[in-house]
Image (cartoon, rainbow, N blue to C red):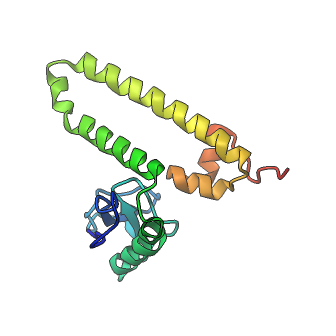
């Protein structure tokens, strides 16, 4: 795991790591590089950021760290503070991880847990729909949008109808 020493306010909470990428593009459990089928490593941050390119397994952890520092942390540190959008995203991820961590309560109240999880899914789906509309208005390329969602471009097109080449005004 990586951090930035003497980071500006709010940025010290960002922790980078290399995540094993499986043959189908899915991510393995962070820190589990021994998982069969790993084909690459991906730089990631606890705030939800992922690198735009994967690294080879050989020396990939060092490359992933360089990507995390140059693509993610350097721009944030240049701002001098964590942008509100980063902070909100990190806080939301932290809350979701806390919800997941506390799922054992479902042993005594599974229906309550299922209702909460269903509501979270509804909110997440609505958020993705709204953000896809913004991405389309900003003419963001299909590949970038798919990367941000952690999915394959063809799957994104099939699921949402997002165009291969957004129209230019």
Q: Nearer the viewer, residue 130 or 4?
A: 4
Res. 158 visible in picture: no
Identity of the residue furthest to the bottom in this view: 59
Where does the image place residue 46, in percent across and percent down from the top left?
A: 33, 56
Q: Nearer the viewer, residue 139 or 159?
A: 139
Q: Quadrant of the N terminus?
A: bottom left
Tell me: residue 65, above or below residue 16.
Answer: below
When asked about the image quadrant of residue 111, the answer is: top left
Number of numbered tags placed on the structure image: 0
Tell me: residue 67, above or below residue 31.
Answer: below
Where does the image place residue 169, in percent across and percent down from the top left?
A: 85, 50
Looking at the image, which residue is at 59% across and 35% down? Answer: 129
Where does the image place residue 72, in percent across and percent down from the top left?
A: 45, 66
Looking at the image, which residue is at 68% across and 54% down? Answer: 140
In this picture, residue 110 sits left or right of residue 92: left
Where does the image place residue 19, in percent across and percent down from the top left?
A: 34, 64
When asked about the image quadrant of residue 97, the answer is: top left
Identity of the residue furthest to the right in this view: 169
Tell me: residue 91, above or below residue 27.
Answer: above
Tell me: residue 130, above or below residue 2.
Answer: above
Looking at the image, which residue is at 39% across and 49% down? Answer: 87
In this picture, residue 141 sits left or right of residue 32: right
Res. 114 visible in picture: yes
When asked about the image quadrant of residue 107, the answer is: top left
In this picture, residue 168 sits left or right of residue 4: right
């Amino acid at each position: 795991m990586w951090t930035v020493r003497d980071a500006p306010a709010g940025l010290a909470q960002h922790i980078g790591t290399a995540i094993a990428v499986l043959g189908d593009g899915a991510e393995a459990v962070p820190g589990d590089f021994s998982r069969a089928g790993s084909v690459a490593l991906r730089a990631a941050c606890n705030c939800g950021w992922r690198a735009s390119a994967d690294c080879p397994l050989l020396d990939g952890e060092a490359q992933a760290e360089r990507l995390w520092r140059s693509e993610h942390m350097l721009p944030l540190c240049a701002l001098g503070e964590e942008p509100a959008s980063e902070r909100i995203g990190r806080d939301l991820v932290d809350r979701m991880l806390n919800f997941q961590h506390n799922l054992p309560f479902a042993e005594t109240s599974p229906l309550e847990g299922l209702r909460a999880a269903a509501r979270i899914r509804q909110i997440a789906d609505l958020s993705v729909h709204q953000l896809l509309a913004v991405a389309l208005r900003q003419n963001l390329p299909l590949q970038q949008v798919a990367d941000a969602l952690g999915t394959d471009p063809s799957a994104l097109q099939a699921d949402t109808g997002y165009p291969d080449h957004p129209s230019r005004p």
